[in-house]
Image (cartoon, coloured by chain):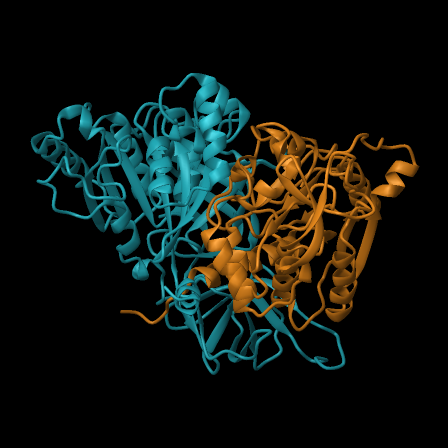
Amino acid sequence: MTEETDTKGYLDMDLLRFTTAGSVDDGKSTLIGRLLYDSKNLFEDQLEAVEESSRQRGDENVNLALLTDGLKAEREQGITIDVAYRYFATPKRKFIIADTPGHIQYTRNMVTGASTANLAIILVDARHGVIEQTCRHSFIADLLRIRHVVVAVNKMDLVDHSEEVFNDIISQFKEFASRLDNIVDMTCIPISALNGDNVVDPSENMPWYEGSTLLYHLETVYIGSDQNHVEARFPVQWVIRPHSEKYHDFRGYGGRVAGGVFKPGDDIVVQPSGFTSKIKSIESMDGPLEEVYAPLSTTITLEDEIDISRGDMIIKANNPPHKGQEIEAMICWFSEVKNLSSRSKFVLRHTTKEVKAVVKEVRYKININTLHKLEDDLEFKLNDIGRICLRTSGPLFYDSYKKNRVTGSFILIDEQSNETVAAGMIL
Amino acid sequence: MNSYRVTHLKQLESEAIFILRETAAQFEKPGLLFSGGKDSIVMAHLARKAFWPARLPFPLLHVDTGHNFPETLEFRNHYVEEINADLTVALVQDSIDQGKVVEEKGINASRNKLQTVTLLDAIEDCGFDACLGGGRRDEEKARAKERFFSHRDDFGQWDPKNQRPELWNIFNGRKHHGEHFRVFPLSNWTEMDVWQYLKLENIELPNLYFAHDREVVKRNGTLLAISDVVQAQADETTETLQVRFRTIGDMTCTGAVESDADTLDKVIQEVATARQTERGTRSDDKRSETAMEDRKREGYF
């Protein structure tokens, strides 16, 4: 490969964010280590450090799991506590992995990791098949609207690389997954992370499997339709007023497009004021642009001078967002210290806007292992997921989370501690 | 097929600009840590884009250990003037003179640890409630779990076990009096992304990053540049090699690599085939397996 083509290729790569959830024993860290190792994304000094640690711990082989277990406490206890982000690239794509623990007490970490992912890898131990935690991970992926799911049936070496075992697990999984509705694309791959079968290189032990290897799938899965390019939404983040001689009258609105496409000349409406105007220009340091779309950060100027500030939303009139002060949402509760129940009060942050919110009613909680609704215990404790109705101090301009992940999501903040205590997905 | 494709560099740029604007909006007095290294140059460039055509709505802060390469300081002064930004310089030498820190002794003495005290003092003196830094999660394993908005208590300390969850692109910068935040807009960038972005945007860099002849000494496997603060010991010999620097920190601990990469394209090619992470040339990280985590807990960037 020549220098020039290599550089050009890199400037034209996609980005895929995926999440992995797994428990201590199902080989998740080994899988990530394997992806990094076999795709040659490990550096000598990282490998040396891991070899040295493995030796000190008395591990027989190089323990690839040590690559991903970052913090002291984790290495000591042999568990992954937090969400750790890993990066690697192949000539086709750059990947961001949100690596999360899989136990139920880390549900909030899984929710966090899933919130920015396009794809989820659900690890299933071939010896155990679809178990409670498989259902939990799939439910969380679905709740956070991850469109693409890979079911990686791991440890195939421990079931004699059996096609029958694999097929049984897949039909079990499909039966369960028929109850989830956001997953549009599901791929099942038999692997052995320990030995590297079907991770980067095709397995010689499973000639019956004719599908892609895991890495090939990650490199080629189509994610272009994951962004909303229909409903135009532009939450204003920052008003740019240079007050300089050259740009004396410049008044630009900085923000990141949350949905749709904006072009100069487009008719727009500003919420909540309801004022209308036209887009005059789309500005950048490198000159004006012909259009912007999600998820680009940009600066918009308007034909008319109207009062706009942070927290307002620029939209197009033909397909406006919902407007309201009563919000039905699914939430995941994050606090170890406080519980949520009816009449609890919070600060709610939605796009660039902050309002106060009170829980009007708790509808139900969900047992995330069985997906059963719980309607007799209505107090949210750490990691609980369920549906609530909130009343806000001012109107929100929102979409359902299903339609738009940016304008359909919010967080709740505890006013005393300033901690982020819940993640919300608007129904 | 839709035509609304966004390359990974554009996505990273958009994310970083979003975070820079959030920082300006959510805090009363942010500051941007600027060392003259490539990551902080990318940060300043992104900040210009975020607020263009207005000036940066926050000053730059440089913690000068006194062990910087002269080329770095030259570049810093020239760059700050060019982009018309405000610069505050905090000197580690002042902290030493005031008796707040004691200089390490011995031939491997480094001011790396001392600069944390100077930094925390400067944050307090300037009244910064948020400090923007160019830290990336790919640099070191303790950074892999760092947040974009990283909360610090009134002692500037980081508690890795008690970090706020960050969901979607919603950042919670609320804080109590006396607390502050470190903000890392480049969290999701890798070393390769930074280099490619420098190329894409045609951004100027200090010449230390490109191959040049320099007198160096090999110590503990690291090539150190000979200077006022690094002299060869009796049993060491110096040699002049064609080298460049992958990171720019103190002269006492930033190792050079032998290289003939004298253009950005050649550097990128070299990074692509490198067998060592860039912090592999930093002797400060080799002190113990958790050296970075320990320093970060105390308030290091």
Q: Which chain is cyan?
A: A
Residue drawn at 65 percent across, 69 percent down: A240
What percent of the width, then of the height, locates residue A263?
A: 45, 78
Residue drawn at 43 percent across, 42 percent down: A42
Say above or below: A416 vs B37. Answer: above
Residue A287 in sight from this viewpoint: yes
What percent of the width, then of the height, locates residue A308?
A: 60, 68
Q: Quadrant of residue B53?
A: bottom right
Residue drawn at 19 percent across, 48 percent down: A212
Along the viewing direction, whichever of B107 and B47 lies nearer the viewer: B107
Q: Which chain is orange?
A: B
Say above or below: A59 vs B212. Answer: above
Single out the residue that lies furthest toward the top. Answer: A58
Along the viewing direction, whichever of A363 and B207 lies nearer the viewer: B207
Say above or below: A59 vs A197. Answer: above
Along the viewing direction, whichever of A118 and A280 lies nearer the viewer: A118
For residue A88, side relative to residue A127 (left or right): right
What percent of the width, then of the height, locates residue B24?
A: 66, 56
For residue B48, side relative to residue A11 (left or right): right
What percent of the width, then of the height, locates residue B241?
A: 65, 53
- Quarter of the rendering occupied by the N terminus of chain A: bottom left
